Image (cartoon, rainbow, N blue to C red):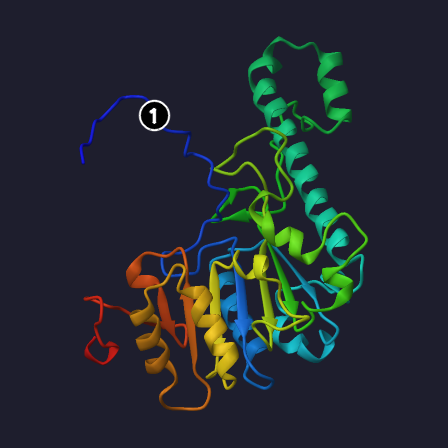
Amino acid sequence: MRIKKVNVYNLEPDASVSNTYDTDKLQFKAPGIHMFLGARMQGKTRAMAKVVKNAQKSNVYDRIYIISNSAESNRDYFGDFVKDMDIIPATKDSIDIIVSRIEEDRDEYLQYLDELERYQRLLVEIKALGIDEIIALYEEGFVDEKGKPIKPTFKYQRNGKTRPPTKLLIVDDCLQSDSLLKSNGKHTISSIMLYNRHIAPLNGRTIQNRSALGLGVFFAVQSYSCSNGTPRFVREQLTELSIMGKIKQPKQYEKVREEVLNIIDPDQFDLAYEYSFKKGKFNSLTISFGAEPDMRFRHNFNNFIIFDKPNDNPETE
C-alpha cells in the first residue's frame, strides 16, 4: 500500500457559526436534546427541574416552554422559570404555537438590531440635522428632550450584554402522544428535534456565532424504545441521555446499550452503568455524547466518571 498526498481539499469551511448558547464550563452544552429515561416514580421531572434550575443560575435560557398535561401538579418544580402563558397542553397545535412564539421573539430581536443600527448612525448624523428634523425624531421616540439619541434596549440579556434569545422546551411524559408525533401542523416534536439548532433563522445574519435562535429540548419518557415510543431517528439526535434508575427490562437495556455504543466505548459504558446503579435507590447515569472524554459520564449529575485508561475502574478515580 502507498500513500500519495495531494493538495486538493485544503480549504476549511467557516467555523464561526456554531448556534450554541453560552454555558458555564461544567454545564451541559446548549441547545441540546436531552432525554430523561426512567420508570414511573424515578424522579424524571425532578431531575429536569434540577438541570433547569442550575442552568438558570447563569441565565442560560431566556424563555422556557412546557408541554405537559400534568403541569399544574408540577408547578413547584418549574414555576419560577416558566410563565403561565408558556405552559401548553399536548395538542396537535402545541409545537406550531411554540415555534411561532420563538419566531416572534426573533422578529423583535431583528427589529432591535435595526434600531441599534439607526441609533449608531444618529450618533454621527445628529450634529448635521436641523431643529425640525430633531423634533420629528423626538416625536418618533429616537431622541430625548435634549435631542440626544436614545439607545434601544432588548428584553433579554446575559451578564449585561444583549444576545439573540435562548430557548428551552420541556416535554414532560407526553412525548409519545399522537398529537405531538402526528401533528397536522407545520412542525412536530420529531421534526424540531432534527433541526433544533436551526429554528428561527436570523435572516442571513450571524450574531455571536449564531445564525438562528435554536431550541433546546428536554423530554421525559418511561420507555426508551417500544412500538409507540420514541422514534429511532429522534434517539439518534440525543446530545444527552440521563438514565434515571436501573433499567429493569433486559430488552430495553440491550436496546440502550446497542445504540449508545455507536458513539460510546462499550467497556466504559458497562463500567459507568454498573458503578452508577450498584447501590442506592435513586441514582442516575448521564451520557453526554458530544462531550470531551472526561465529561462524558456523570453519576447523579455532579460526579464525573473519568477513565484514565480504556478499561479503568471508576472505583479507582
Against 5, residue 290 (above or below) is: below
Q: Where is residue 227 in the image (x, y as percent from the top left)?
A: 66, 71
Is 196 on the left-hand or right-hand side of 241? right
Circle 1 sits on which residue?
Answer: 9
Quadrant assignment for the C terminus: bottom left
Q: Position of residue 260 (x, y in %)?
A: 43, 65
Label total for image: 1
Residue beneath the point at 35% across and 88% down: 278
Judged from the image, the secondary structure of the residue bearing numbered disc 1 is loop
Against 4, residue 284 (above or below) is: below
Is 3 on the left-hand or right-hand side of 14? left
Residue farthest toward the bottom in the current orientation of the protein: 280
Name the amino acid, label 1: Tyr
Q: Position of residue 179 (x, y in %)?
A: 78, 63
Is 155 on the left-hand or right-hand side of 5? right
User: Who is closer to the viewer here, 218 or 235?
Assistant: 235
Residue beneath the point at 43% across and 34% down: 16
Against 213, residue 122 (above or below) is: above
